[in-house]
Image (cartoon, helix red, strand yellow):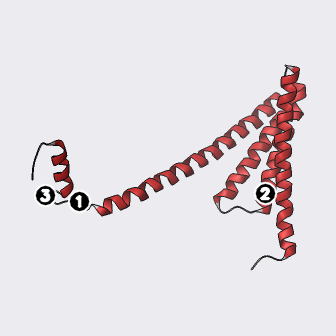
Amino acid sequence: MSPPPRHRTAIRVPLAIAIALGVLSVAGSLLLVAADAIRGTVTWAHHSSASAAPLFLIAAAIAAVSIGRPPEARHGLLRLVAVLAFTAWGTGQVTPDPAAAGAFNDAAILLFIIDGACLVVTEARAGLAWHWQKARPAAAQHPPAEPGASSPRDHAAARNDGSARP
């Protein structure tokens, strides 16, 4: 059973907004890089708000996609961490007080590290689980032999190196 048309529209709107904000964020970042390359210089006055805008846009895009397609369990927490990290980084860009800007930038770094560490742990655990799953069937096919007993594999290995015959 599909959701009613009104519900589908309600889901599509935040997702369309998320896409638009994400595209604007990337476009704004590319323009910033291109402008710096063309001018051959980077001035902080130019960068403070210009570099903050894509950061705020991507934070809003992550929030909008989270509304349009709510995440499950800890993925929601990781999206919140990402929103907070980009928001802290953008705020650090436009904060005139250097001490406060440094605190916002440090908070952004910490949040990005948390996000990255969660990704690494999740991927590493999935990789280990995959290897354990692959190793189990191989171990189940060849039960351990009794101490002192030889298996057909031992005889085949001995024949291949020429050191023993059955």
| Contact between labelled residues 1 and 3, with CB atoms less than 8 Å apart | no
Q: CA distance from mark 3 to mark 1?
A: 10 Å
Q: What is the secondary structure assignment of the residue under circle 1?
A: loop
Q: Residue at x 21, y 54 (%)?
A: 153
**Label 2: few (<14), some (14–19) or many (≥20) C-alpha neighbours in 10 Å:** many
Q: Which residue appears at 32% of the width and 59% of the height? A: 139
Q: Callout 2: helix, strand or loop?
A: helix
The amino acid type, in three-letter code, at marker 2 is Val
Q: Tell me residue 19's x, y (percent).
A: 82, 52
The first of marks 2 and 3 along the sequence is 2
Taking 110 as reference, is 53 left or right?
A: right
Foreground: 21 or 71?
21
Mark 3 crowdedness (10 Å alpha carbons): few <14, some 14-19, many ≥20: few
State the CA–CA distance, disc 2 to disc 3.
62 Å
Distance from the alpha carbon under mark 1 to that under mark 2: 52 Å
Q: Position of residue 20 (x, y in %)?
A: 86, 51
From the viewer's side, name the closer residue of 29 and 60.
Answer: 29
What residue is disc 3 on? 149
Q: From the image, tell me which residue sits under label 2.
A: 65
Q: Which residue is mark 1?
A: 144
How far across and how far down the image is residue 133, in percent? 43, 59
At label 3, the amino acid type is Ala
Q: Residues within 10 Å of mark 1 (few under 14, many from 20)?
A: few
Q: Quadrant of the N terminus?
A: bottom right
Q: Is residue 55 visible?
A: yes
Residue type highlighted by circle 1: Pro
Tell us which disc is closer to us: 1 or 2. 1
Q: Secondary structure at mark 3?
A: loop
For this orientation, the residue located farthest to the bottom is 1
Residue 34 figure quarter: top right
Tell me if I can see residue 43 in this picture.
no
